[in-house]
Image (cartoon, rainbow, N blue to C red):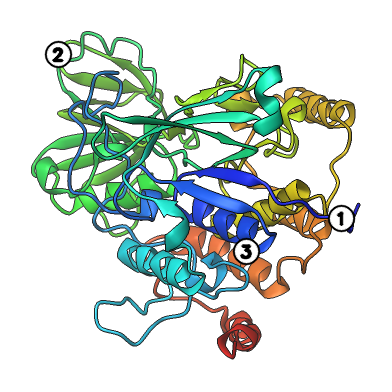
Amino acid sequence: MQSQITTSYKVAVIGAGAAGLVAARELRREGHQVVVFERNSTIGGTWVYDTATESDPLGVDPSRTIVHTSLYDSLRTNLPREVMGFLDYPFLPKDVKQRDSRRFPGHREVLHYLEDFMSEFELTELIRFETQVIHVGLLKEEEQQVGKWLVRSRGKDRIVEDDEVYNAVVVCNGHYSVPRVAEIPGIGVWPGKQIHSHNYRVPDPFCKKVVVLIGSSASACDISRDIAKVAKEVHVASRSITSETPTKPVGYNNLWMHSMIKSAHDDGTLVFQDGSSVLVDVILHCTGYKYDFPFLETANIVTVDDNRVGPLYEHVFPPSLAPWLSFIGLPWKVVPFPLCELQSKWVAGILSGRISLPSQEEMMSNVEAFYAKLEAAGMPKRYTHNMASYQFEYDDWLAARCPCAPIEEWRKQMYAATSKNKVIQPETYRDEWEDHNWLLQAHKDFHQYMSN
């Protein structure tokens, strides 16, 4: 539903990664007054590489020194740049020194792209760098005539705290900082070292070691191959592997694929569900992350339960706090930049009054029906925001609400072709592809933005 009367609000955006940047752009386009809070000295969020790692390599000690990036040095995107970029700001190669022109570039090129985006849309002036948000909470009802949210932040001196009132808060703080760790029977007596991929940077520390890596994600695939260059042995354990005996990927003599770990033992041995066992030096958990909003106080209206952030209407709005609190970028197993862009357009248009939301009761009913559907399918709560099977339907749903053009057909087809190619040739899919027709269509579409 569309309304012609628009309103401008004071909006706080938490985080200046890809989600926060595109949220800031869309909110300002819609006429809102935007302040972006970024705890670091640069933009980019998870795309900022840092050689530093946390004091607890497993990432479970609450008193550990925190590092907010999870990038490893060798990381290249697992999506082609044409698919990955924002809808109206193509991720094109630049013929400039220090830039990476490959279709599947390294992580530094993605950060450069986000810096270009920030410059192109003059977002720097909206961002407060080195400013940590330590509290976001609802104002008392009698105070709400000046806004709805108290935002407390701390500058780089880490001493002085500032309290400000905002009409709305958009949470864009990412979800790659708080590790999830696999539960392994007997791990308490196992004498080896454990690390989470959050703290993996380079393979050198694993030289001549026997390493077990847990997980089946893109990072697990990349890191296992990275470590295999220097390790004595690498064993990958995953729920998705069901073979009764360990298998070796083609081209590797020191890399084995196993079913999940059954148990750990005090002599350093790990036993797998396929019956094999290995004497292991290091366990590397590539087991994902937990959603975490330590600054947010909603009187338990919004909770994180087994990694389900809820209740959220369409993964964005808590029904009873909509539209004054929203979350951008929660879904995973998606093409994140376009999804964040469409979510941001939707949020910005709703706040201005140009787009209408259903009633609180209708939104809550929608959430409950969605949760019931997941439960009926036997889906654990932690997969609530996994959109692998319907991300483009979701994107197009958002586009229809905004309203704006749906996701381009070439982008959908190129994504599908890459996913297929990744399975067929996991070692070379980033450098060998056969989606040239879709590539031509993409660049034809990009001309409309390049001429502006």
Q: CA distance from mark 2 to mark 1?
A: 70 Å
Q: Is residue 335 visible?
A: no
| Local SS, label 2 | loop
Residue 51 position (above or below residue 270): below
Image x and y of residue 283, in percent:
25, 29
- Mark 1, Cα crowd under 10 Å, few <14 / some 14-19 / many 20+, is few
Report which residue position mark 1 lands on.
5
Report which residue position mark 2 lands on.
267
- Residue at left 39%, top 74%? 431
Residue 232 position (above or below residue 146): below
Nearest the eye: 165 or 81: 165
Nearest the eye: 47 or 385: 47
Nearest the eye: 109 or 159: 159
Q: Which mark is residue 431?
A: none
The mark lying in front, picked from 3 and 2, is 3
Quarter the C terminus occupies: bottom right
The answer to whether 325 appears left or right of 359 in the picture is left
Q: Badges 3 and 2: C-beta atoms under 8 Å apart?
A: no
Q: CA distance from mark 1 to mark 3?
A: 40 Å
Image x and y of residue 426, in percent:
42, 60
Q: Which mark is residue 416?
A: 3
Image x and y of residue 36, in percent:
48, 48
Q: CA distance from mark 3 to mark 2?
A: 45 Å
Q: What amino acid type is highlighted by mark number 1? A: Ile
The image quarter in which residue 341 lies: bottom right
Label 3 or label 2, whichever comes before in sequence order:
2
- Residue at left 17%, top 43%? 52
| Local SS, label 1 | loop
